[in-house]
Image (cartoon, grey):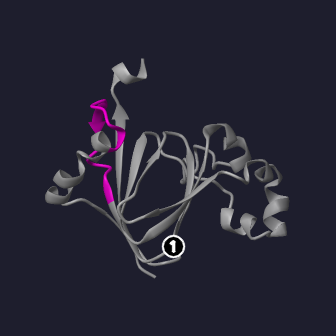
Amino acid sequence: RLYLKSGMKAKLLEDVTPLPHAVFGFGGVEKISTSLAKVWVGSKGNVTPLHFDLCHGCLIQIVGAKDVILFPLETSRSLYPFPSSCGAPRTSRLDLDALLAGCKTTEETFPLAKDAIGGVRCRIYAGDALYIPPFWWHHVTAAEDNVSVIMPFDMSKELLA
């Protein structure tokens, strides 16, 4: 399997930086986190485990498709985050794929996870953009060989007021 995460070359960054403005239809993006903007290239079946990010994100699918499951902040307790002192902050100890497959060991080890099992599910295709709010948990599976871009950003203070 192929799995590559890379920073963006200047030209690509120049092309995608306006996207959060275009996606949300307002000029309220305070700061695009260009140092955190990444290009992801992967093979079908690759998984980005359940985690959350600290800022707003726009996941833009360039080629192929991805399945995304999102969980709101309120479900954090049921998703068993690693302690902040651990080497995997903002990541769940829960193997969501195992839970969804009905693994009894996972169900017994993480009994509260059944409370959060639904989530919001979607498939994004080439040309789609998915907004991921800060602190929302997300699990991503490559449905096909794919290329995507993640654009992290912060909202302006005026929009948050």
Q: Write down the residue under mark 1.
A: 143
- Residue placed furthest toward the bottom: 1
Residue 9: percent from left, percent from top: 18, 60
Q: Residue at x 48, y 78 (%)?
A: 44
**Residue in front for this viewpoint, 24 or 161:** 24
Of residue 54 and residue 117, the one placed in the foreground of this image is 117
Using the image as rendered, state which of residue 104 and residue 155 is in the foreground: 155
Q: Is residue 32 above or below residue 157?
A: below
Residue 30, image quadrant:
top left
Please name the residue shown 46% across and 82% down the image: 1
Magenta residue check for 85: no
Which residue is at the front of the view, 43 or 26?
A: 26
Residue at image coords 23%, 47%: 17
Which residues are drawn in magenta?
A: 23-38
Q: Quadrant of the C terminus?
A: top left
Secondary structure under the numbered disc 1 in the rendered image: loop
Which residue is outermost to the left? 11
Q: Amino acid at mark 1?
A: Ala
Category of crowding for the residue at label 1, using alpha-carbon neighbours closer than 10 angstroms: few (below 14), some (14–19), many (at least 20): many
Q: Position of residue 78 (x, y in %)?
A: 73, 46
Q: Is 148 displayed left or right of 17 in the figure?
A: right
Q: Is residue 97 above or below residue 26?
A: below
Residue 126, quarter of picture:
bottom left
